[in-house]
């Protein structure tokens, strides 16, 4: 006996057919109205002698599933097996400093004591800690080394030592190494680009808050100095130097930027080949320092979809799915955000808040990088009882946002439901990507 998977969504096309997407397997098919009606009739009786054409394909794509099997239990087992038993990547957010030369009002790290930058001794201890960790966790075969901050480029000296040192350690341990960087882009220069490009660098992400007239009222230097032109010139330098195939631009989306995003897309299109600029949208979220106010989820989805439609019309690649989980770097088994003082945390968004330290590189690693607050799998029980189709691309949502919303103590065990946003975005992206 078959049934339609509970992780399936249907969305009408403009000509009356239906997009069918399974959020567990990612399969997308197009069904005419007649095919869907014939399928519904057959599913009601399941006559083995008159199986409609296409049923075998729908089974293979996970859109039709065993009717007596609990699909939520199947999903949970698969998710936990992948997370616990098949984890082989260690993601390290390497934060040489929490200081930043900009003063953005919505920064996640506002309100913290930004302290001192990382010293050589902490770098050396972190290398020893990682070596010991890999010895205890032989399943780790890959290190994703992510330069993060604060603004990491305030610490070019320690970056110049840390990147080759971690790469050499990985080579010695037989572990794959790759390098990424998140930067505000102001201090980017040819020297650092050249250095990073020698070390399996595969991604740089720079945030822009709209076109110059908007960006320069928000992402400003401490004295109110504008930064847009300088960042854009650095992006031009970076693209001309062929250091990476593409640069990732994160466009901030909130009430202050929403109506200006198409103008930012125009500016980015003027840089030349759109395949060399990968776009993403960064939705501003409430933080511990500023826990209030965000755009309505319907409005957010509409602005995001209009931005994607415009970017697509100018030749930019757009995403075909919007996800909020189910496992992020903080809930992954092997991951840490290394603070400048050597403390380790699970989520880079809690940086600088010592109540989120779960270990320190000066201590021996104990088992894996575990912080119970980021392993509250029961937070999805309510999602299961509500039979939410978005579980495989959400998993109860962001733990950090839940802690901001419900308090650091209680929040980790609560889900952060953005179902309206997930639903509207995923339907809109289906239409944009496949129609
Ligand atoms: S907990 Fe939330 S903010 Fe932290 S890494 Fe996961 S998704 Fe991102
Ligand atoms: S948090 Fe909301 S959207 Fe996410 S799986 Fe649960 S019910 Fe669905």
Image: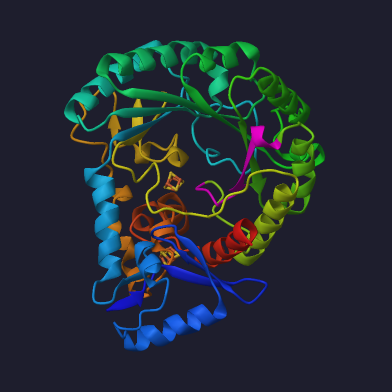
Residues rendered magenta in the picture: 274-288
Q: Quadrant of residue 106?
A: top right
In the image, farthest residue toward the front: 49
As displayed, is residue 9 above or below residue 266? below
Q: Nearer the viewer, residue 294 or 94?
A: 94
Q: x, y (%) of residue 173?
A: 26, 18
Q: What residue do we see at 26% from left, 63% from top? A: 74
The C terminus appears in which quarter of the rendering?
bottom right
> Could you say which quadrant of the image residue 317 lies in?
top right
> Is 138 situated above or below 285?
above
Q: Is residue 255 magenta?
A: no
Q: Quadrant of residue 61?
A: bottom left
Q: How many numbered marks are there?
A: 0
Q: Which residue is most to the right?
A: 213
Please state which of residues 140 and 431 is positioned toward the viewer in this rendering.
Answer: 431
Between 129 and 144, which is closer to the camera in this rendering?
Answer: 144
> Is residue 103 visible in this depiction of the protein?
no
- Residue 251 lies left or right of residue 40; in this view the side is right
Q: Depth check: give the residue in front, 72 or 290.
A: 72
Q: Tell me where residue 145 appears, x and y as whole percent.
A: 42, 26
């Amino acid at each position: 006996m078959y049934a339609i998977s509970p992780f399936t969504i249907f969305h009408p096309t403009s000509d009356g057919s239906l997009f069918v997407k399974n959020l567990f397997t990612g399969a997308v098919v197009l069904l005419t109205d007649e095919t869907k009606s014939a399928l519904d009739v057959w599913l009601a009786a399941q006559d083995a002698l008159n199986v409609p054409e296409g049923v075998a394909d729908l089974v293979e794509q996970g859109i039709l599933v065993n009717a007596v099997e609990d699909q939520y239990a199947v999903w949970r087992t698969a998710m936990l097996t992948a997370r616990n038993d098949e984890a082989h990547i260690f993601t390290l957010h390497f934060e040489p400093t929490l200081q930043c030369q900009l003063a953005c009002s919505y920064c996640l790290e506002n309100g913290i004591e930004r302290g001192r930058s990382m010293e050589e001794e902490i770098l050396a201890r972190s290398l020893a800690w990682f070596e010991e960790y890999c010895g205890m966790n032989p399943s780790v075969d890959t290190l994703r080394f992510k330069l993060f901050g604060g603004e990491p480029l305030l610490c070019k000296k320690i970056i110049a030592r840390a990147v080759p040192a971690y790469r050499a350690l990985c080579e010695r341990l037989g572990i794959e190494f790759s390098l990424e960087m998140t930067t505000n882009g102001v201090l980017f220069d040819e020297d650092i680009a050249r250095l990073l490009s020698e070390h399996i660098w595969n991604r740089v992400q720079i945030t822009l808050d709209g076109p110059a007239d908007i960006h320069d009222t928000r992402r400003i230097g401490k004295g109110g100095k504008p930064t847009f032109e300088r960042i854009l010139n650095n992006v031009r330098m970076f693209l001309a130097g062929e250091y990476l195939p593409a640069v990732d631009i994160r466009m901030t989306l909130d009430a202050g930027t929403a109506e200006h995003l198409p103008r930012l897309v125009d500016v980015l299109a003027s840089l030349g080949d759109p395949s060399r600029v990968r776009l993403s949208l960064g939705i501003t979220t409430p933080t511990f320092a500023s826990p209030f106010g965000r755009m309505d989820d319907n409005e957010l989805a509409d602005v995001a979809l209009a931005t994607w439609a415009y970017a697509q019309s100018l030749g930019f690649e757009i995403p075909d799915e919007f996800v909020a989980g189910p496992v992020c770097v903080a809930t992954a088994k092997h991951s840490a955000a290394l603070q400048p003082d050597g403390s380790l945390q699970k989520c880079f968004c809690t940086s600088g808040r010592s109540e989120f330290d779960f270990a320190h590189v000066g201590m021996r690693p104990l088992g894996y990088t575990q912080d119970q607050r980021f392993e509250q799998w029961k937070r999805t029980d309510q999602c299961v009882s509500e039979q939410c189709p978005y579980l495989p691309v959400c998993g109860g949502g962001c733990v950090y946002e839940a802690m901001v919303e419900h308090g650091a103590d209680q929040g980790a065990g609560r889900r952060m439901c953005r179902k309206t946003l997930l639903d509207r975005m995923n339907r809109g992206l289906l239409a944009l990507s496949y129609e």
